[in-house]
Amino acid sequence: MKNFKNYILFFLTLILISSCTSDFEEINADPNRIEEISPATLLNPIIYGLASHNIGRADAITFNLMQVSLPFPSVSGGLHRYDVSMNIGSSSWNNYYRWLKNIQEMQTAADTFEDNNYKAIALTLKAWVYANLTDLFGPVPMTEAVMGEENILYPSFDSQEFVYQSILEDLEEANQLYNEEESMVYLEDILFQNDVVRWKKFTNSLHMRLLLRISNREETNAFQKLTQLVQNPEIYPVFENTEESAILQVTGVEPNVSPWGRPQDFRLSTKIASFFLDHLNEWEDPRRSIIATEATQEIDSVITSIGYVGIPSAYEGPESQFNYEASTFNIQQVENPMQIFLLTYAEVEFINAELAQRGYISNAEEHYINGVTAAIEQLGAEIPENYFDNNTTAYNGSLEQIMLQKYYALYFTDYQQWLEYRRTGLPELPTTSTMFNNGVMPSRFYYPSDLAVENPQGYQQALEMLGGSDDINIKVWWDTQD
């Protein structure tokens, strides 16, 4: 009887979805019509909504801060010069809390249906979003967040320590909830196609990322917990190859389409930064042709290719100093079909490489090579046989080398390059005299400007936990870099 009921509910869900517009955003706009049908109804809109927002922020923010690209011309100001606007984080704040409401509804439905797999997925998605929120801002509402229906319109803020404790507990619970013997019977999800094992590996791979994120706080024993997780793959399975990775395959079939309605805008008035291209050139890296166009220069009245050449971030002087047309992005990266990276096998292997480099596990070189290889392969390139024969790519035992290659592995992965830089201070990025903020990398975003008016008590509570001011140089709890 239960199976028959689920069968009927599955088709009712399909009927209701097909009666809506095909756009994910519209499906999400009126969840009350369908949220009681199954805990899976909101899953695809959540995945797509978060993925498309995050890849947009990677382009607009992370690329500029981390010297992947820069607007050009840009003689003064700009985020690549650490000129940070007050509302730079507002888009992520609003989007993340919007999707957290939907994740909460999904979890409630999973509880109603007593479906532990979907509850585990909801807990995982919640942890993913709250981690980004607290990493970007510091203290954030969590305990009283998305509780408007309970008439909590002005939520209090929770400390960063509490947020991390909560999300790590949620990931531990999620890992225990998964039932690989029980199928995900509803509409196929667009990330893992209802593969419970891959969802479980995503949960534990995210657990690895977040334990490493707080590892500079000795009181958390994060390295020890991370080591225990890695050494018990039967209990905590993680991604073992690129095919298992959390990479959203954007098909180009509505509504799963590129977030760039006009792909040409991806490279409009944009050049790739010298820092990003110079290392790839030194390594003769096959990712160059996938990511970038070749620069050109007029030589003897003929437009000639001069290879992959960028523009220095925060460059000094007029744009006329560059007598060449610098490399920009290949728009194929954002054309249908395309990929959106959430968390990949390459990242998992770089976490293992760092653990080994620090002496917690063994085989640092093997994990490093696996990470580099996977990072190249996830972009659709093939690693040359002699790639590691280069003195600059052969493993040298240093954290600096691991983090430089990880920087490239995290290309186009939301804010992760910036967050890892704040944790380690690596890779070492060049500075110039035209940079704002005394040439110091910002440590967080300002809170949205309307927060002080809409929730003054919560805002003041947050400022007290930050030490008294809403400043981009105040370090979040786990950021202990000098």
Image (tube, grey):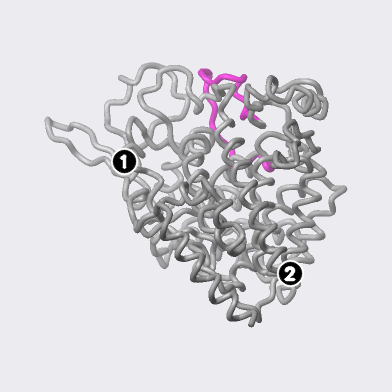
The disc at residue 262 is: 1
User: In front of the other: label 2 or label 1?
Assistant: 2
Cα separation between marks 2 and 1: 42 Å
- Of all residues shown, which one is farthest toward the left? 301
Image vertical order of residue 113 relative to residue 431, above or below: below
In magenta, the rendered stretch is: 423-442
Q: Nearer the viewer, residue 353 or 74?
A: 74
Q: Quadrant of residue 339?
A: bottom left
For disc 2, the neighbor class at 10 Å (few under 14, some 14 to 19, many from 20) is: some
Residue 435 counted in the magenta span: yes
The image shows residue 345 at horizontal and vertical percentages of: 56, 63
Per the image, the residue denoted by label 2 is 177
The image shows residue 438 at horizontal and vertical percentages of: 62, 19
Total labels drawn: 2
The amino acid beneath tag 1 is: Arg
Specify which label sits upstream in the sequence, 2 or 1: 2
Residue 398 in view here = no
Residue placed at 56% from the left, 48% from the top? 404
The amino acid beneath tag 2 is: Leu
Image vertical order of residue 168 relative to residue 195, above or below: above
Q: Nearer the viewer, residue 426 or 45?
A: 45
